[in-house]
Image: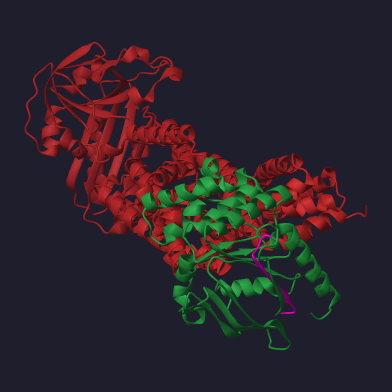
């Protein structure tokens, strides 16, 4: 046969079915673009240097896997409906003398062409979109984005390869569909009518189980960081659950409705319920995809919007005073109290140099020791901290010992703590009994101050592992009990922290200058003294960083949301058009049997509305379940404002709902046009 | 008064830009009495399906009128036409036109559901006709699961269940094998003997030989009609064949 025959056949075949193939190819282009951008964000290191970059990257990597799975499922499903519509054509080919090998070749070229087109245009779209969005966004909100999108070769190669695999699977599936049918079967298959789906209770219940356990795990998570793996499990469960539930559960629901004769045999329900039961199995996949995309958009938008709009708030929480400084030294030596006094002098001299008046001074030192706590009692067994590999971070707690005298003078309290007694405060939900045992030292717990613990540590609520503040009579003598504990490197586990924060009465530039000067002086002061870590910071110097980081996150959120929503649009359009073709003859018959145009329109509307609402409702529920976790993640960014997150979520839900509604309205026009 | 009367029906198809016009029906007039079983015969393109569609109010005549039980179809308002159709007419199609999303039972219920009948009443009605039609044990099946003959019997049930004044059948045996055709024709005869008026369009001589009267259409006009009277199916078959031969030879009566 002439060279180029098969590619030519493939192209003309796709062109003739353009109404179905064009949306399919556009969808796969978008999927490639989406994949590229996600892959790029997670593997190219653009996110590095952000607070919580590790978590964000983990999530992105996870997102890439989910995305791959999602693309595969979706493309697989839509392509099989696409082929179903063309079986007649293939039957005709084989009657005209082609064997299955020939048809297989045509299909191979079709899939290959689709892959090349989607991969090429998808990459162009991915790169272009990210560039364009970056430009537009920087101009629009005047946010200095920290992430510049460059072209990443490895991401491009990954996108091409991953989609090669997906398209190859699609090709195999198509061959399978064609292979086991003879020409007459193929010709007839268009007319034969599809088997009505059986109500598959097993799958439906399985779906609900997945959904339920996903929700359960999600709601159980207290520590989003240490439980990140569980969070991913929950997400996977919810995704699988959504697919199964929408695909099987909806058929079951329709079957139950059909059993209720009073409900079912009503003009407005009769047609829509049975049609829905019939097509849910296939369209369930589309609906589930829409639902997952919508949920992703809602979560991304509401969390990043909450962060961006609350960035001042975060800043104030994280840096309650204008200037701050910190120093830390492991082990114990006699000179530490003296060092604290030297720090005070240093602060005073630097402040005087800059003409600052120190106000709201909050300077104190504390001893710290980390260990496991067990049985919800803070019984720290320090010698089990020997092997890093077996550390369960959920059970690690950091204990801070502060002198009662310091506590009283710095934070304006009036407590008395006797020897062997302790006042305990922690922001985490840790049950502490009457006695607190740390190592082999036991304290009588005489009181709790959990409510005011943020005085000492403003971001205590958001800390990844629990911090427990213990007010004792004499922290130095307590600390001496812990000198003997060494970590697996033989380094002492006891640490001395010096914290300092105060207001200056200076303007923004003055504060920044003071902080950097302080930093230099600290360096000079602590040279050769064995301090592991020290720095100074200022509220104003961090502002740009905060706004930049959060603006950048918001920008990423918007960018990804746009891409996800566009994919949604394509899925919906695809659904409407393919359903329109299916329903064309159906509504013709109904008219002949005596259904008025009005009744048809009503039935279409009720059906469409139900189908329209399903993904939104599901996405709303998903969002509700995931919001507490999102809130906990936001705490890591020092945003402690659940109402703000709720508000952002509500606004995003409304906006997305509105957008979705508009899209639905527009695409249902396409449907009406085909049916009428 | 006749149950159904077609008066001077004319149907002209115009090409889209009003150029040439094709006359599908030209001055067709006939009447059908209550309880009659009338077959309309003619070759492909003779206009017989157009005629049936006009009688079923699926299509509008260019001129002339159809009067069913004293009611002029052209006077029925557009939005009432579907209701009129489902209350007064039962339609049996060549391609069955069953909805594949419904079980046979639900397909049969469709016109009743549209009319807002109660489930109990629908069941009652179906019970009466399911047994004679031989579909009582396949009601729960879906169209794709049953044979063509069974599908057509379900379609007949759908037409009968509303107690229509007339059953209109368009090539009802066209998509059936000979055994199923014979069964369907026997069924029609039986239904007709129970008093049901049937108007059937066909080009099968065998189908037409079951009818009590056969109208022949040629080039959009009634060409001839024969009554069965007391003749047997076989004699009727012969008569029809003769007429068709005459028709084909283009001779005058």
On the picture, is A218 further left or further right than A91? left
Q: How many marks?
A: 0
Corner quadrant of residue A182? top right
Would you place residue B20 above or below residue A650 in this image? Answer: below
Residue sitting at the far right: A1
Rendered image quadrant of residue B52: bottom right
The residue that appears at 69% across and 87% down in the rendered structure is B17
Residue B105, how many percent across, how many down?
Answer: 50, 48
Q: Residue at x 91, y 54 (%)?
A: A3
Q: Residue at x 21, y 24 (%)?
A: A431
x and y percentages locating residue A445 in the rendered image: 13, 20
Q: Specify the quadrant of the image occupied by residue A208.
A: top left
Frontmost residue, B36 versus A395: B36
> Is residue A268 covered in magenta?
no
Magenta residue span: B210-220
**Residue A547 seen in the current view:** yes
* Quadrant where the image shows the C terminus of chain B: bottom right
Q: Is residue A587 above or below residue A637?
A: below
Q: Indicate left or right for A615 with A381 as reference.
A: right
Left or right of B200 in this view: A13: right
Query: Which chain is drawn using red?
Result: A
Q: Residue B237 at x, y = what percent?
A: 75, 61
Q: Give the color of chain B as drawn.
A: green
In magenta stretch: residue B215: yes
């Amino acid at each position: 046969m002439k060279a180029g025959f098969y590619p030519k056949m493939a192209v003309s075949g796709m062109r003739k079915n353009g109404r179905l193939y064009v949306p399919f190819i556009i969808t796969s282009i978008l999927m490639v673009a989406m994949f590229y951008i996600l892959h790029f964000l997670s593997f190219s290191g653009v996110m590095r240097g952000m607070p919580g970059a590790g978590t964000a990257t983990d999530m992105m990597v996870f997102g890439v896997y989910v995305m791959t799975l999602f693309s595969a499922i979706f493309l697989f499903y839509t392509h099989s409906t696409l082929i179903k519509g063309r079986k007649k054509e293939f039957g005709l080919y084989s009657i005209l003398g082609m064997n299955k090998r020939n048809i297989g070749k045509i299909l191979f070229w079709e899939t290959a062409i689709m892959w090349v087109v989607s991969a090429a245009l998808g990459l162009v779209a991915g790169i272009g979109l990210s560039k364009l969005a970056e430009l537009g966004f920087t101009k629009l909100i005047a946010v200095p984005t920290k992430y510049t999108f460059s072209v990443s070769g490895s991401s491009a190669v990954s996108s091409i390869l991953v989609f090669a695999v997906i398209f190859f699977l699609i090709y195999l599936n198509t061959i399978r569909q064609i292979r086991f049918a003879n020409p007459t079967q193929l010709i007839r298959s268009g007319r034969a009518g599809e088997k009505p789906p059986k109500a598959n209770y097993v799958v439906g219940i399985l779906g609900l189980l997945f959904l339920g356990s996903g929700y359960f795990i999600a709601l159980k998570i207290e520590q989003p960081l240490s439980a990140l793996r569980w969070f991913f499990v929950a997400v996977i469960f919810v995704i699988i659950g959504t697919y199964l539930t929408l695909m099987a559960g909806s058929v079951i629901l329709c079957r139950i409705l059909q059993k209720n004769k009073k409900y079912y045999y009503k003009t407005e329900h009769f047609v829509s319920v049975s049609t829905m039961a019939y097509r849910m199995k296939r369209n369930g996949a589309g609906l589930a995809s829409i639902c997952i995309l919508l949920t992703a958009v809602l979560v991304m938008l509401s969390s990043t919007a909450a962060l961006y709009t609350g960035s001042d708030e975060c800043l104030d929480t994280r840096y309650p005073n204008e200037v701050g400084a910190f120093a830390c030294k492991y082990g114990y030596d006699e000179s530490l109290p003296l060092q604290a006094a030297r720090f005070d002098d240093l602060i005073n001299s630097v402040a005087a140099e800059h003409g600052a008046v120190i106000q709201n001074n909050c300077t104190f030192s504390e001893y710290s020791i980390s260990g496991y706590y067990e049985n919800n009692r803070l019984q720290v067994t320090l010698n089990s901290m020997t092997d890093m590999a077996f550390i369960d971070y959920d059970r690690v707690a950091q204990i801070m010992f502060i002198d009662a005298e310091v506590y009283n003078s710095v934070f304006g309290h009036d407590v008395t703590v006797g020897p062997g007694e302790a006042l305990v405060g922690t922001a985490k939900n840790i049950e502490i009994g009457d006695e607190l045992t740390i190592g082999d030292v036991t304290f009588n717990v005489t009181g709790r101050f959990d409510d005011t613990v943020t005085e000492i540590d403003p971001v205590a609520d958001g800390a990844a592992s629990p911090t427990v503040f213990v007010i004792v009579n004499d922290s130095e003598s307590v600390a001496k009990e812990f000198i003997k504990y060494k970590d697996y490197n033989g380094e002492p586990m006891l640490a001395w922290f010096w914290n300092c924060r105060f207001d200056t009465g200076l303007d923004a530039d003055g504060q920044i200058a003071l902080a950097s000067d302080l930093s230099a002086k600290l360096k000079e002061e602590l040279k050769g003294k064995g301090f592991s870590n020290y720095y100074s910071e200022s509220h104003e110097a961090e502002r740009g960083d905060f706004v930049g980081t959060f603006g950048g996150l918001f920008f990423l959120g918007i960018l990804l949301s746009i891409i996800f929503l566009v994919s949604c649009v394509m899925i919906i359009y695809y659904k409407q058009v393919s359903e329109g073709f299916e329903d064309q003859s159906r509504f013709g018959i109904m008219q002949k049997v005596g259904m008025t145009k009005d009744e048809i329109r009503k039935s279409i509307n009720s059906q469409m509305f139900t189908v329209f609402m399903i993904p939104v409702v599901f996405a709303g529920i998903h969002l509700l379940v995931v919001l507490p976790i999102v809130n906990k993640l936001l705490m890591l960014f020092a945003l402690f404002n659940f109402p703000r997150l709720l508000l952002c979520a509500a606004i995003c839900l409304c906006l997305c709902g509105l957008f979705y509604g508009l899209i639905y309205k527009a695409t249902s026009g396409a449907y009406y046009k085909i049916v009428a | 008064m006749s149950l159904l009367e077609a008066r001077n029906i004319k149907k002209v198809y115009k090409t889209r830009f009003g150029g040439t016009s094709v006359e599908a029906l030209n001055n067709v007039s006939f009447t059908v009495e209550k309880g009659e079983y009338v077959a309309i015969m003619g070759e492909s393109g003779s206009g017989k399906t157009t005629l049936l569609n006009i009688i079923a109010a699926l299509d509008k005549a260019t001129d002339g009128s159809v009067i069913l039980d004293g009611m002029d179809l052209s006077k029925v308002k557009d939005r009432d036409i579907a209701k009129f159709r489902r209350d007064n007419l039962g339609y049996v199609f060549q391609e069955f036109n069953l909805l594949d999303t419904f079980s046979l039972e639900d397909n049969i219920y469709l016109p009743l559901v549209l009319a807002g009948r109660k489930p109990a009443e629908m069941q009652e009605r179906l019970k009466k006709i399911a047994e004679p039609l031989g579909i009582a044990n396949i009601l729960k099946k879906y169209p794709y699961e049953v044979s063509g003959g069974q599908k057509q019997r379900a379609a007949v049930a759908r037409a009968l269940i509303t107690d229509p004044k007339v059953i209109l059948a368009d090539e009802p045996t066209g998509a059936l094998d000979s055994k199923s055709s014979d069964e369907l024709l026997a069924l029609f005869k039986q239904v007709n003997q129970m008093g049901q008026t049937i108007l059937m369009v066909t080009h099968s001589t065998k189908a037409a030989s079951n009818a009590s009267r056969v109208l022949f259409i040629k080039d959009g006009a009634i060409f001839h009609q024969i009554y069965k009277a007391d003749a047997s199916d076989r004699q009727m078959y012969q008569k029809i064949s003769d007429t068709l031969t005459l028709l084909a030879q283009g001779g005058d009566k």
